[in-house]
Amino acid sequence: MEKYPRRNGVAAKKPGFWKRLIKGIIPWKGDSAAAVIRKLVFIIALIVFLVTAIPLVSDVFMMFRDQWRSQGISNIYIPDGNSGGASKEILPSFKKLLEINPDTVGYLKIDGTAIDYPVVKGKDNDYYLTHDFYGEKSKSGSVMMDCNCVVSPDGNSGNMVLYGHNMAVGTFFACLSEYWRTLYDSYDAPSMQFYKDHPTITFNTLYEEAEWKIFGIGLFNIYEEYGEVYYNYNNKHDFTSRDDFNHFIIDLMDRSDIFTDVDIEYGDDILTLSTCYWPFRSDMDNVRLAIFARKVRPGESTYVDVSKAKVNTYVKRWQWVYDNIGGGYDWSQSNWDRRKLLSYTAEDAERDGYTFIDDINDSDGIYDYNNGDGYDY
């Protein structure tokens, strides 16, 4: 029998492509029961796919759109090149940004990375999580300063905290995860390559252009069910005394995954970059990754000897990590050489039960210390 039977001696016309496609998908008169079931299953699967795929594609499109808009902003902002100290007047380089968004408080850039963004500060810490620099709804949000921080001609908060999303397409604060990841890319000899390539940050406020040297990189738990929740890293913005500052830094360095050659002292301005991170994959909800830097002092070189950086092998975590990742150990002592904290005196050490030792043969260039138990760390 012919596939397309003749009628009145004339071969029937072959159905067009679209009609055949539709008949192959939609249940049609004359279909067997099995064919109808097969087509219905396919239609349901197609609907499910579209329902899930369309929002995903839309989200990815929005992320790239956000990045494209951000690149346009980076062409608007041109630094004045004046690093001679704080001004009482808003720097001319911020004029155009302030015309677009009066919430502008600064500009953040890490050379050689995707981080090249204006910084805004809202009335709360929620609005700019979902709105871009132009005030439009956005999956990427904006790089924002904690709403409790201060930027003014009379001075800034002692610890300025900036937040940004860790975007899957690599934008905003996504590259910060490379600082932590390359600390653990080899068990025997971690490269620390991202830190070595990017040891400094440029963060200019409305009143001052400045470089910042990274001195710490750490993970922080945000769920009480997993153990200690350390809020100080992003909730403490000012320091009431030298002791207050010193203990803030010591607490951070106990939790830092890296020790660098950068020294710190009371009076230094601190910059904190914070983002979400998933270092433990699906085993635990996301944590916070924070990068800590201090402002380059007047007359100081921006050079950092990255060869002296090393991984902290005894970092302070939280209980879930001790139980599931760290072999059950529980942190009990500091591992950071407090000589890097220039405002920490011998009297402070004696009061705290901390003992400095001389270790002139230390091959890694960073002094270790002895806590009195007979072992150097």
Image: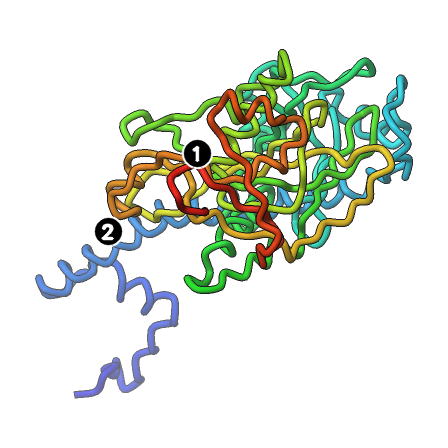
For the residue pair 304 and 88, the one nearer the viewer reads as: 304
Q: Vertical placement of 307 versus 284: above or below? A: below
Image coords of residue 269 (percent x, y): 70, 27
Image coords of residue 149 (percent x, y): 64, 18
Describe residue 155's horizontal placement relative to residue 333 as left or right. Answer: right
Q: Vertical placement of 341 versus 110: above or below? A: above
Image coords of residue 53 (percent x, y): 39, 50
Q: Vertical placement of 186 versus 258: above or below? A: below
For marks 2 and 1, the one nearer the N-term is: 2
Residue at 23%, 82% in the rendered image:
5
For the residue pair 44 and 89, the one nearer the viewer reads as: 89
Task: Note whether residue 97 is visible.
Answer: yes
Describe residue 241's horizontal placement relative to residue 336 as left or right. Answer: right
Task: Locate the N terminus and report the quarter of the image it occupies.
Answer: bottom left
Task: Note whether residue 139 is visible.
Answer: no
Q: In this figure, which residue is indicated by the disc labeled 2?
A: 44
Residue 340 is labelled as none
Residue at 30%, 84% in the rendered image:
11
Q: In this figure, which residue is indicated by the disc labeled 1?
A: 220
Image coords of residue 275 (percent x, y): 52, 37
Residue at 66%, 56% in the rendered image:
197
Name the amino acid, label 1.
Phe
For the residue pair 166 and 200, the one nearer the viewer reads as: 200
Instruction: Give the structural element (helix, strand or loop) at label 2.
Output: helix
